Amino acid sequence: MWCIVSKKGDFHLGIHYFPPDYRPDLPEGEPMIAPLHSPSLIREAVCHPSVFPWVAAVEDPEEFVWEPSRWHFALGAWDGDEYLGCFIFEIRNPRLVEAHVALLPKAWGPRAKQAGEEAIRWVFKLTRFERIHAAVSVRNRAALAYVERVGMTPWGKAPRSSSKGDDQIFFGISKEA
C-alpha cells in the first residue's frame, strides 16, 4: 500500500523517500508543493479562523490534533519562503485519496489555484493513486468554485452528510484527466 510510514522521523511515500525537511527547488514566485510533516504548520492552516469552520470535523480548534498516520499524508504549499497552507489527503484505497484543502487567506486567488493544480500533479506523478475526490459542503461557495477551478468535476451529492449536517457535493479528478 502507498502511504506514509514514519521510521525514526523519516517519512516514505511509496517507494519515494522524503527526509522531514524536504523542499524541492522551484523558481521563485511559483507555489511550491512538498511533503509536510510539521504538525504546527498543518495546525496553523487548519485552525486559521477563516479556514477552520469549513474544514474541521471538531467544534473547537483546541480539539484538532494532527498525528502522522499510514492513512493520510499532507502536502505543504509555499511561495518562496512564505507558507500558504496545506493539502491533506486521506487514503481511501490503493487507487483513491480524498483531498482536504486548508489554504491560508493570503494564498486565496491565483496562488491558491496554482498550488491546487501543483498538488494534484504531485499526487499523480509521485504516487500510484489514480483518482482524487473531494466532498464540499453546499454552503461553502468558495470551495465549490475552487475545486472546479483546479480541474475537478462534480459526480454526486449526499444529503446531510457533512459533520455539520450540510449536503455535500462530491468532486473528482482522474490521473488521465
Image (spheres, helix red, strand yellow):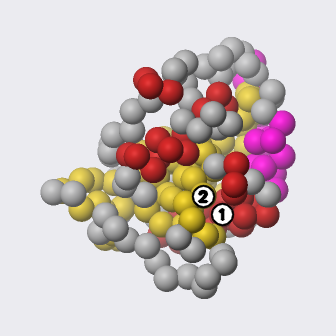
Mark 2 nearby-residue class (10 Å; few <14, some 14–19, many ≥20): many
Residue 56 percent coordinates (x, y): 56, 29
Report how many numbered discs are placed on residues in the image.
2
Give the residue number, with chain letter if any, for mark 2: 84
Q: From the image, which quarter does the C terminus lie in?
A: bottom right
Q: Earlier in the sequence, mark 2 or mark 1?
A: 2
Give the camera-side residue of 102 and 100.
102
At 39% from the left and 33% from the top, the residue drawn is 65
Looking at the image, residue 30 lies above or below residue 160? below
Residue 112 percent coordinates (x, y): 71, 58
Give the camera-side residue of 100 and 32.
32
- Magenta-colored stretch includes residue 151: yes
- Magenta-colored stretch includes residue 9: no
From the image, state whether disc 2 or disc 1 is nearer to you. 2
Residue 171 percent coordinates (x, y): 73, 43
At 31% from the left and 64% from the top, the residue drawn is 20
Residue 150 percent coordinates (x, y): 75, 58
Q: Kindly tell me whether residue 93 is visible in this rendering.
A: no
Q: Give the range drawn in magenta.
A: 141-159
At 75% from the left and 61% from the top, the residue drawn is 113
Q: In which quarter of the image is residue 77?
A: bottom right
Left or right: residue 11 compared with residue 60: left
Q: Do callouts 2 and 1 mark residues in contact (Cβ within 8 Å)?
A: yes
* Residue type for callout 1: Ala
The single residue placed furthest to the left in the displayed view is 8
Looking at the image, residue 48 lies above or below residue 4? above
Looking at the image, residue 42 lies above or below residue 150? above
Mark 1, secondary structure of its residue: helix
* Residue type for callout 2: Leu
Give the residue number, with chain letter if any, for mark 1: 115
